[in-house]
Amino acid sequence: MTVRDLAARLPEPDALRAACRAFGVLDAVFDIEYPKYHFTAAWRSGVDLAHMDNGGGDRWNIVFESAGVFLYGFDHMSEATPWRDEPRAHWPGLLDGLPAALARWTEEEAFLFEDFFDATVCVWREAGDSAWRHGPVSFDDDAPFTDGSEWLFDDIADGSVAAYLSHAQSYFEREIDLESVRAVFGGEALTAEIVRALNAEADFDEVARIAGRAGVRADLSEPELS
């Protein structure tokens, strides 16, 4: 799968944002310090940010703003890595056609490494557009090629409860309470009961703080004990 396949698989922007929020909140339940997925509402004025970092040098960011959605990923082992050349250079066509309204994110300081926008895959969708877009990249169809699209974005492009369960069971190496995951995906207020069902060792106050930063309401009242 390359960026062309990813653009065809991505859900509508609102559904993508909801999935990113759920992934970020749930990951915080299992690991406050080093979650794989993050979500920050109002990261900038009028801007929400979803972020993935696998701790091995690979990452993605998705910006949600009034002008649209800008998504990019970096797979450091990809054939499309800018590090294949010196000085670094993007894969031909990667950013061609990127609308001016979203192009500023390629210069966002938080997304730069050594003053360069490291990316192997980019997708965008302007507000009011009916489809996801990408640059006119081309790859040799007769040779195996990866730009990181599949393994970086597979779970979040699916965006389902099942996709999260698959990620969490593998990444955190534990069984996951299905109904609690469904509650978070369903937009229910985060409760101590939900958090305990997922991870009895989690600090609910800290999880609630992170959930609030993600735009998820936490119910701080303890249920009555029967």
Image: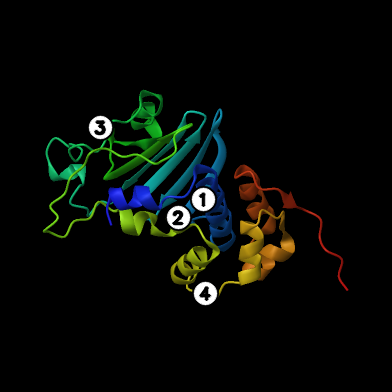
Residue at 69% x, 54% y: name it. Answer: 205
Quarter that holds the N terminus: bottom left
Q: Which residue is mark 1?
A: 20
**Of discs 1 and 3, which sits in the foreground?**
3
Q: Earlier in the sequence, mark 1 or mark 2?
A: 1
**Of discs 2 and 3, which sits in the foreground?**
3
Give 201 or 18, whichever is nearer the viewer. Answer: 18
- Is mark 1 in CB contact (under 8 Å) with mark 2? yes
Kindly state the secondary structure of the residue where label 2 is placed. helix
Give the CA distance from mark 4 to mark 2.
20 Å
In the displayed structure image, the side of residue 181 where residue 13 appears, left or right: left
Give the CA distance from mark 2 to mark 3.
24 Å
**Of discs 4 and 2, which sits in the foreground?**
2
Inspect this view and state whether residue 56 appears: no
Quarter that holds the C terminus: bottom right
Kindly state the secondary structure of the residue where label 4 is placed. loop
Give 221 or 91, whichever is nearer the viewer. Answer: 91
In the displayed structure image, the side of residue 47 where residue 133 appears, left or right: left
Q: Which residue is mark 2?
A: 156
Relative image position of residue 148 (x, y in whole percent) = 28, 53
Question: Residue furthest toward the bottom?
Answer: 175
Q: Earlier in the sequence, mark 2 or mark 3?
A: 3
Residue at 56% x, 28% y: name it. Answer: 45
Inspect this view and state whether residue 161 appears: yes
In the displayed structure image, the side of residue 174 where residue 86 appears, left or right: left
Question: Residue furthest toward the front?
Answer: 130
> From what the image shows, is residue 158 above or below residue 72?
below
Kindly state the secondary structure of the residue where label 3 is placed. loop
Q: Which residue is mark 3?
A: 96
Q: Which residue is mark 4?
A: 174
